[in-house]
Amino acid sequence: MVNRWVGLTIDCVDVQEVASFWSALLDRPQGPSEPGWVYLGHPDDPQPRLVFQPVSEPKNGKVRLHLDVAVDDVEQGIAQVIALGGTYTGERHDHDGGAVVVMADPEGHEFCLVQYF
């Protein structure tokens, strides 16, 4: 039996808003989706799909699983996220190998922008 990772599902109150944010940030088009849901990508894509699932309650507390998004320039990445409706949490970690900043999408799901040196 071969197992492979095919997607990550994100719970959202406003599926269209959050999916549009991630679609623009990652340049991933919407693929075939179930009614009320939005899928970015297709099941046979080389990258796992992002799936946005409608829920009635907003995010509560810290997300215990997050995406890392590699960027060429972390400052430009911060500006892009903010322009798309996300936020910068103010948390930044500089290491010998790069910089990591913690961002959040329009509904507060945390993720990291990573610039490798």
Image (cartoon, rainbow, N blue to C red):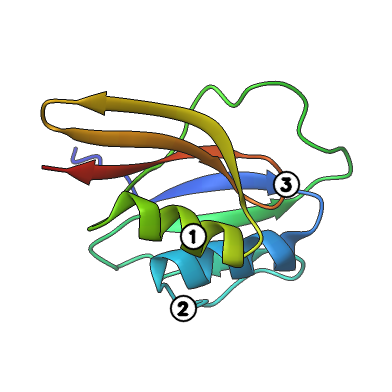
In the depicted structure, whether residue 50 falls above or below residue 8: below
In the displayed structure, does residue 10 sit left or right of residue 11? left
Indicate the position of residue 101 as horizontal and vertical percent values: 41, 36
In the depicted structure, whether residue 58 falls above or below residue 87: above
Depth check: give the residue in front, 27 or 98: 98
In the displayed structure, does residue 98 sit left or right of residue 8? left
In the depicted structure, whether residue 93 falls above or below residue 42: above
What amino acid type is highlighted by mark number 3?
Answer: Glu
Mark 2 or 1 closer to N-term?
A: 2
Q: Do callouts 3 and 2 mark residues in contact (Cβ within 8 Å)?
A: no
In the displayed structure, does residue 87 sit left or right of residue 58? left
**CA gap, disc 3 to disc 2?**
20 Å
Query: Which residue position holds label 2?
Result: 29
Residue 37 in view in this figure = yes
Callout count: 3
Task: Give the SS element for disc 1.
Answer: helix
Mark 3 or 2 closer to N-term?
A: 2
* Quarter of the rendering occupied by the N terminus: top left
Depth check: give the residue in front, 81 or 31: 81
Query: Which residue position holds label 3?
Result: 107
**CA gap, disc 1 to disc 3?**
18 Å
Task: Give the SS element for disc 2.
Answer: loop
Indicate the position of residue 45 as horizontal and vertical percent values: 29, 68
Mark 1 or 3 closer to N-term?
A: 1
| Residue drawn at 28 percent across, 59 percent down | 47
Query: Which residue position holds label 1?
Result: 79
Q: Which mark is residue 59?
A: none
What amino acid type is highlighted by mark number 1?
Answer: Ala
